[in-house]
Image: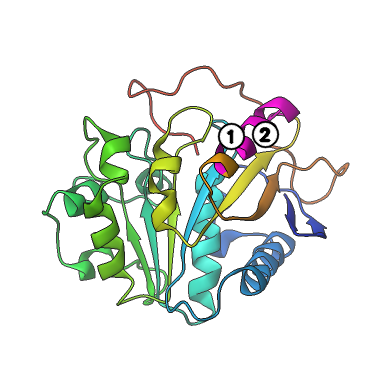
Amino acid sequence: MKLFYKKKQVFVNTADEKTLHKNLDFTAAEQYKLLRANLDFTLTHDEKCPVIGVTSSLRGESKSTTSINLSYVLAEKGNKVLLIDGDLRLPSIAKKMDLENETGFTELLIGQGAPFSNFKSNILDNWYILPSGRIPPNPSELLGSKRTKDVLDELKKYFDYIVVDLPPVNIVSDAISIAGFLSGMIVVVREEYCGKKELAHCVRQLKLSNVNVLGFVMTCANLGGGTYGKYKYKKYKYYNNDSEGED
């Protein structure tokens, strides 16, 4: 993985989707901690609970893995952190974390849900994981609704950070729809997978929508060896409700 914020750059390779939270290699874990440190320079310090969106240009760039690991290292420092699977079309957080997905973010947005103690992780007491829940018929409209703003504003009272995993910008408009309720967005870029045109289109869409882009995370950097190899190459084809989410 290659992480870069502003003019700073660091490199580390990742292996596969099983490379999560406490199972990370030392070098990879340190790079997520560097990502955490860089956020301190890009987020507004007077905001009690920043809401950080994580997106990408295309499907399969490891945005969900990045969301999980970022929220974990934020919680590891002692912060009370909520990770939300905001990909209401192809959710993957529940599968990666071996959680039930019957109740989640969708239910919260439509006025249902469960006590928040149900979503506390069994890894860290201060790390909460909210799955997507059921797939709604109108994800983009739901994420851009006043109800979503109200729910996030209420959640901010109980947490120090909220991380929201979102669908790719170039595929659906969901990430743009919710962007106005976020403190900023991190864009995940997969090396030798996302082309310059795709990334440029993604950035252009974010700028046109006045999204606060906090920085970029490059995954699967090929540095010629090392502890971790590259992710298996899988070309994007479709992004619909007929298959499970893959980051």
User: Seen in the image, is 11 located left or right of residue 150?
Assistant: right
- Asked if labels 1 and 2 touch by Cβ distance under 8 angstroms, the answer is yes
Residue drawn at (30%, 67%) of the image: 153
Secondary structure character of the magenta stretch overall: helix
Measured from the top left, where is residue 39 in percent x and y? 62, 68
- Residue 57 shows which numbered tag? 1
Tell me which segment is drawn in magenta: 193-206
Residue 89 vertical position relative to residue 9 in the rendered view, above or below: above
Residue drawn at (57%, 60%) of the image: 23
Residue drawn at (11%, 54%) of the image: 111
- Front residue of this view, candidates 59 and 150: 150
Which amino acid type is shown beneath numbered disc 1? Answer: Ser
Q: Which residue is mark 2?
A: 199
User: Seen in the image, is 220 located left or right of residue 17?
Assistant: right
- Helix, strand or loop at mark 1: loop
User: Seen in the image, is 202 located left or right of residue 193?
Assistant: left
